[in-house]
Image (tube, grey):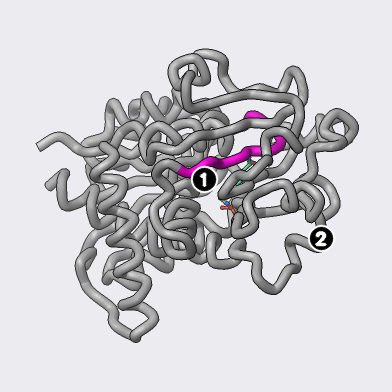
C-alpha cells in the first residue's frame, strides 16, 4: 500500500479530519487518566528541522514516546542535507530506515519532492506555505470548548502567511466561513483564495472582519525567514493587533487563538495573552494529542 502523506489539510477528507479530532480528544483523556498505549511500539519517527521549533519538536517527541515509539531529531545543518545532498536521495535513504517522517522547512515544494521519493508517510511540520498540524490542534481546541466548528465564522487578523493559508484549507475541510483582515500587500495566495471564494473573504478592516465572529486568530507579523523585515512589518501591520477592543466586536462567547510563539504588544496584546480564561495554552498542548492521532492514523492506513 502506498504511504499516506499529510502535507496539507487537503490530503485527508473532511471525514478523516473529523475522526482525527475525535481521536485526539480521546487520547488526551486517556493520557490525563494515566493510560499509555503502545500503538506505535517499535516505530521510529525521523524529524527534519530546517527552522527552529519548541512546540513541534517536543510534541512529536513526547507523543512518540507516550505511544511506545522512538524519534530522531535531525537538524538539517548537522546532516548531509545541510551540505547539499539532494532531497530525493535523502528521502530514499531515510525512508528505508524509519517508519514515518516529519519535516519543517522553507518552500512547500521541498516537502512535496521529499514525499514523492519517500516510502513512508511524510508530515508537514511547517513550510512557508502551510502549517496543517497546528490546524488540527486549533480545531480540536475549538471543538472541545464550543462543539463543532461547522457553519461558524472565523476571523484571521494579520499576515496572510502559512497559518492563514492553512485556515483557508480548514475553512474548506471543516466547513466554516473565514474573514481575513490583512494590510494591502500581505494577502494570502490569490489562487487559494479564489479556489475558496464563497467562504473566504478578504478585507483591510479588522473591526469589520471581527464582527460577531465565533473565533479570532492571529500569528506573528514576521515569520521564520522574514526576520530582516521585522522592523518594517511592525509599521505596516499597525492597527492589526488582536486585543480586547477587537475581541469586543466578536460574538460574546468568541474564542481567540495564537499558534505561538507570540510577540506581546505586536500582533496580540499582553492582556489577551495573560488572560486567565484564554485557551491559547490548551491550543499549544493539543499539538501533542492531535499529532499522536495523526501518526497513529497515517501508519495504520499506510501499512
Ligand atoms: N506553533 C508552533 O509550531 O510552534 P514551534 O515553532 O515552537 O514549533
Ligand atoms: N508563521 C509562523 C508560524 C510559527 C509557528 C512562522 O512561520 O514562523
User: 183 above or below 162?
Assistant: above
Say which of 90 and 103 sits in front. Answer: 103
Query: Which quarter of the image is occupied by the N terminus?
Result: top left
Circle on res. 40: none
Q: Residue 37: name its quadrant.
A: bottom left
Q: Which mark is residue 270?
A: 2
On the question of residue 84 being in view, the answer is yes
Whether 211 is drawn above or below 86: the answer is below
Which residue is denoted by mark 1 in the rendering? Answer: 49
Q: Position of residue 268 (x, y in %)?
A: 77, 51
34 in magenta: no
> For this rendering, which residue is in front, 276 or 89?
276
Residue 126 lies, in percent from the top left, at: 51, 40
Disc 2 secondary structure class:
helix
Q: Nearer the viewer, mark 2 or mark 1?
A: 2
Image quadrant, ligand 2: top right
Query: Does the beta carbon of the residue at mark 2 sit less than 8 Å from ligand 1?
Result: no
Residue under the image location 53 percent in, 29 percent down: 129
- Please state the extent of the stretch shown in magenta in the rendering: 152-160
What x and y, as percent, mark residue 48? 46, 45
Question: Could you tell me which secondary element the residue under label 1 belongs to?
Answer: strand
Give me the C-alpha separation between circle 2 and circle 1: 30 Å
- In the rendered structure, the answer to whether residue 26 lies left or right of residue 198 reads left
Residue 90 in the image: above or below residue 290: above
Point 49% across, 52% down: residue: 138
Mark 2 closeness class: few <14, some 14–19, many ≥20 residues within 10 Å: some
Residue under the point 50% across and 34% down: 177
Amino acid at each position: 500500500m502506498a504511504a499516506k502523506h499529510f502535507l496539507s489539510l487537503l490530503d485527508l477528507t473532511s471525514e478523516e479530519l473529523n475522526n482525527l479530532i475525535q481521536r485526539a480528544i480521546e487520547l488526551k483523556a486517556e493520557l490525563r487518566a494515566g493510560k499509555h498505549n503502545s500503538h506505535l511500539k517499535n516505530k521510529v519517527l525521523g524529524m527534519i528541522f530546517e527552522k527552529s521549533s519548541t512546540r513541534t519538536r517536543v510534541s512529536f517527541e513526547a507523543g512518540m514516546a507516550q505511544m511506545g515509539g522512538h524519534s530522531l531529531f535531525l537538524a538539517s545543518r548537522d546532516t548531509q542535507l545541510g551540505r547539499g545532498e539532494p532531497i530525493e536521495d535523502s528521502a530514499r535513504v531515510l525512508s528505508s530506515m524509519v517508519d514515518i517522517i516529519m519535516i519543517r522547512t522553507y518552500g512547500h515544494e521541498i516537502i512535496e519532492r521529499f514525499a514523492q521519493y519517500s516510502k513512508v508517510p511524510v508530515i508537514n511540520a511547517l513550510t512557508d506555505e502551510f502549517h496543517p498540524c497546528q490546524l488540527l490542534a486549533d480545531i480540536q481546541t475549538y471543538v472541545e470548548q464550543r462543539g463543532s466548528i461547522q457553519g461558524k465564522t472565523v476571523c484571521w487578523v494579520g499576515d496572510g502567511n502559512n497559518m492563514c493559508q492553512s485556515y483557508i484549507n480548514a475553512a474548506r475541510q471543516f466547513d466554516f466561513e473565514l474573514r481575513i483582515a490583512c494590510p494591502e500587500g500581505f494577502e494570502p495566495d490569490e489562487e487559494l483564495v479564489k479556489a475558496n471564494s464563497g467562504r473566504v473573504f478578504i478585507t483591510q478592516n479588522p473591526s469589520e472582519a471581527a464582527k460577531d465572529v465565533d473565533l479570532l486568530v492571529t500569528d506573528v507579523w514576521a515569520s521564520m525567514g522574514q526576520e530582516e523585515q521585522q522592523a518594517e512589518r511592525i509599521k505596516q501591520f499597525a492597527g492589526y493587533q488582536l486585543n480586547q477592543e477587537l475581541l469586543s466586536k466578536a460574538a460574546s462567547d468568541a474564542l481567540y487563538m495564537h499558534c505561538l510563539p507570540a510577540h506581546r504588544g505586536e500582533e496580540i496584546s499582553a492582556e489577551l495573552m495573560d488572560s486567565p480564561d484564554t485557551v491559547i495554552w490548551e491550543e499549544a498542548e493539543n499539538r501533542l494529542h492531535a499529532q499522536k492521532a495523526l501518526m497513529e492514523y497515517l501508519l495504520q492506513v499506510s501499512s
